[in-house]
Image (tube, helix red, strand yellow):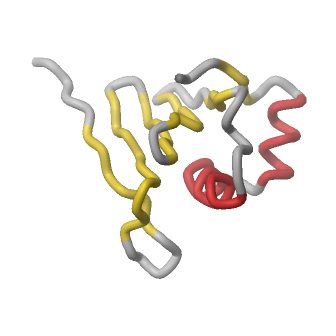
Amino acid sequence: MTYIPTVTNMLSPSGNKVPDQFVIHAEDGWYFQSYTTVIAFKGVDGTIKLDRDSWDFSKTTGKYRNMFLDMKKAETEKLIKDGTITLADLN
């Protein structure tokens, strides 16, 4: 059977759908997309990849990236530095 990815809007802290901020549920994991740009990927195997050019694009992108990853920017930067999070071309 073929897996069909699904797309859902991210939710604000108050529970409302946020326009232009999406989570794509795919067979290999979950993608966070802001507008038309993929920002982050969390694999079913626990790997995390961030788009090297767009992961820290704006305050709004950062807010929802942090929610998607369930971590603050400082922790994300530490994990990039130690190689736990990979920077890649996701677009």
Please, which residue is most extreme toward the bottom here? 14
Residue nearest the observer in this picture, 46 or 79: 79
Total numbered circles: 0
What residue lies at 62% left-to-right and 31% top-to-bottom?
A: 48
Q: Position of residue 57 (x, y in %)?
A: 70, 45
Q: Position of residue 47 (x, y in %)?
A: 60, 27
Q: Quadrant of residue 66?
A: bottom right
Residue nearest the observer in this picture, 13 or 58: 58
The correct choice, above or below, for 69 with respect to 9 in the image is above
Q: Is residue 27 left or right of residue 32?
A: left
Q: Position of residue 13 (x, y in %)?
A: 52, 75
Q: Quadrant of residue 17?
A: bottom left
- Tell me the quadrant of the picture where the N terminus can be found: top left
What residue lies at 89% left-to-right and 30% top-to-bottom?
A: 81
Residue nearest the observer in this picture, 86 or 58: 58
Q: Quadrant of residue 54?
A: top right
The correct choice, above or below, for 14 with respect to 26 in the image is below
The correct choice, above or below, for 8 with respect to 86 in the image is below
Q: Position of residue 18 (x, y in %)?
A: 43, 65
What residue lies at 81% left-to-right and 36% top-to-bottom?
A: 79
Q: Is residue 39 left or right of residue 6?
A: right
